Amino acid sequence: MLLALVFGASLSFWTGALWFGTVFALTWAGAFALDTLTSAGGVEMFHAARMWRFLDREQAHRHQRYSVPKTDRQRTLETVLLAAAVGVTALAVLGLLVAVFAENMPG
């Protein structure tokens, strides 16, 4: 209704244009899907996608199968290293803030 008022065309024109556009888009999408499914390029595309999925699942299974569980000592070491990294980062930020504060002090 707003389009009919703004552009001066009748409401039935915009309804027909919308109907034609929708039918055209659906027909084009259906033809594209049918062509992709039946053409040699489409078959290769689907084959490549399926093989990629197969290889990805096989790799995930292999990684899960051959992964070595971490020991308590390894987990403790990782925790200590993470805490040290967080502490060093906090000290660096505090040092930067002190430097900026000292630089901007009057006097």
Image: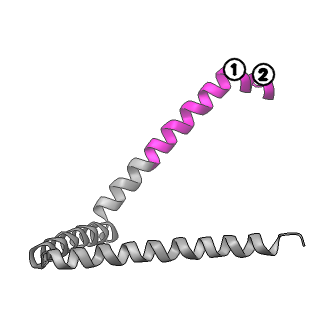
Quadrant occupied by the C terminus: bottom right
**Residue under the image location 43 percent in, 49 percent down:** 29
Q: Where is residue 38 drawn, in percent x and y?
A: 29, 61
Quarter of the image holding residue 54?
A: bottom left
* Residue 20 shown left or right of residue 7 in the figure: left
Instruction: Based on the picture, tell me whether residue 12 belongs to the magenta stretch.
Output: yes
Q: Which residues are magenta?
A: 1-28
Evaluate if marks 2 and 1 touch, with contact meaning CB atoms under 8 Å apart: yes
Q: Nearer the viewer, residue 63 or 43?
A: 63
**Residue under the image location 76 percent in, 25 percent down:** 9
Q: Where is residue 40 drawn, in percent x and y?
A: 30, 71
Q: In the rendering, which numbered label is found on residue 5?
A: 2
Q: Is residue 101 above or below residue 9?
A: below
Element carrying mark 2: helix
**Residue located beneath label 1 in the image:** 1
* Residue 9 shown left or right of residue 47 in the figure: right
**Residue under the image location 29 percent in, 59 percent down:** 37
